[in-house]
Amino acid sequence: MKALRILLGLWLALLTLAPLPLSASAAAPRIDVLRRDGSTTSRITDGDTLRLRLTLPDVVALPLVVDFARPGGPSLANCTIETGQAACETLPISSLGWYWGAAGTRGRASLDARRQDSGDVLAGTVLDASPRPVVMVHGFASSWEAWTTYLGPDGYLAAHGIPGFAVGDGQAPGKLNTGDLAQPTETTSTLLENAAVVGEYIAGVKRLTGAEMVDLVAHSMGGLISRAYIGRVMTERDVAQLIMLGSPMAGTDCANLPAALGLYLPATLELRPSYVRSIFNEQITERRGVTFHALAGVPILEGFQSPCTDVPTDLAVSLSSVTAIPLDAVQLPILHPELNLSAQAFGDFVLPLLQAPGGAFTEAPDPAVSAPPPETARFSRLFRGHVDPGSSAELTIPIDPGITVASFALYDTTRTLQVSVTGASGKTIELDSEKNGLVIIDDPESLFYLGYGFKDPKPGLWRVRLASTATTPPGGADFALSARFVGGAELIAQVDPLLPPAGDPVSLSASLRLGAQALALSAADAVVHRPDGTTETVTLALDGSQSLAQWRAGTAGIYAVDLTVSGSAPDGTPIERSAFLSFEVQPDKKDGSLLLVGVGLGLGLALLAAAVMLVLRRRRKRNPQPSG
């Protein structure tokens, strides 16, 4: 009998190792796909969270480990059918990439269940799959119409069967406020406020489509808004990947010009490199498993052709800014305003990411955050002013020895001013696109209007004349102009702390260096831009090569500092440099406590008044007044 039991045990073990034989009458092994609520389905949207269950016709005598996989692919999940059981179920898994097959094939998602020990296929199923929706986020002073080439029946997305949605298009609730061209002095929403709108819109798209995940495609400032959504607003992951087109991960110095005129605040302040590098990037660090991809436009390679950024650049955002945080980056020779319109950008960069198969979605850990160094700047004084019809303004800019490139950027609210430049030799220079990189951008959404530059400019005093033209409106034109230098003296400037509580002092410091030598200073002043658009000038105290001032922070919000320092080189040549700093005043906790007390007191009084009214009404019912 003992030998018989041993033989019977060996026979049962062999049954678990061999393919399961099925009689003609027995039910076949079955794969069930389960939604979050436990219901079975044969239709999914790419990115849905699912559980997989295998059911055999008979119980197993020994534990059986089952792998689930796409045909020919690696294991997606596994489960174990325990002894005496006929089924097992996986933990929840993501179906990201299941809609797309090899070479862009789509629509059918095949699954196999196979023995882990032998690889033998036990069962298979085919799901009807739909693609993830794509949600698009526009940039500075723009609207959903920035995505017209992507949307509609003839758009890029429809050609590949991908549903497209642009925040603000009315398909779901939510509209961004990144600046209204018709009202440049009106307040914009902050990055975090716009991020909340993105969250509202995504929730609407999910309700409309039934999808659990979306792809985010963002242009320019929209990339910062999308990062804020992922890092601060998103509670449960609903973004498969973030695809950014020319998004300034370290800001753009072009924003200094409209910010200096108090336009499109706080958006232009939040685009400053000092804000993005030192405040935004230090706080918005969580990615929640979302992979970041970025396209950098790099058509401009010469420094004199780039009015306000380093090179390579797309004119508004440099390659170094796009890649300032860890991400997957691609470069194409496309200008900034065309990145969200270009068929090349879509075909070569966006579409392959949207069609990525399941194995492409891996959850990378959040990158380490390192504190940025103090601001080092080589900008001239930022000039701002007004030109009436029939008049002009003349600006003087000293260029010191050692400067190899000087590039100039002009922001003109009317785009009507005429520019003429006189070099240090006293000769008026005819500006040319080939020799001087002259560029005129008529797109009102751009951060500058006109730019030009010079290689190896002659040291001395340069003069720029801005004159009205026949098209200058009766109210005249406001302007802001600055020059960006390569080489020469360097301004090292700092604001401390970056996140002061309301009412606390803020220190401003600055020094000039030429190589390793500290330069003597003759003047230092700062224009502080408050959140409400008003300004205050602060004079820094001089101490040899150092300058310092303290300023007390007011109400909560984003502040900008245009700090300008004057000095001289060892040979007496005048030098002038500016830096554009940022800090964010935090709400006073005491104010918050007082607010809570006030709210509580008001609520208590309201309840007391309601109770008194209730008592009076009851008394009137008991003692009705005689009619007249």
Image (cartoon, rainbow, N blue to C red):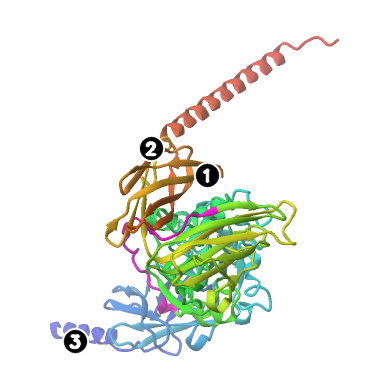
| Near-viewer residue (368 or 374) | 374
Q: Residue at horizontal 33%, vertical 89%?
A: 19
Q: Amino acid at mark 2?
A: Pro
Q: Is residue 373 visible?
A: no
Disc assigned to residue 505 = 2
Amino acid type, residue under disc 1 in the picture: Pro
Who comes first in sequence, dot 2 or dot 3?
A: 3
Q: Quadrant of the C terminus?
A: top right
Q: Position of residue 506 (x, y in %)?
A: 38, 41
Instruction: For the residues labelled 1 and 3, say whether their Cβ atoms are less than 8 Å apart.
Output: no
Front-most of residues 274 and 231: 274
Q: Position of residue 373 (x, y in %)?
A: 32, 57
The residue that mark 3 highlights is: 7
Give SS at disc 2: strand
- Residue 365 colored in magenta in the image: yes
Q: Is residue 319 magenta?
A: no
- The residue carrying pointer 1 sits among few (fewer than 14), some (14 to 19) or many (20 or more) residues within 10 Å by Cα, namely many
Q: Amino acid at mark 3?
A: Leu
Residue 270 horizontal side relative to residue 177, left or right: left
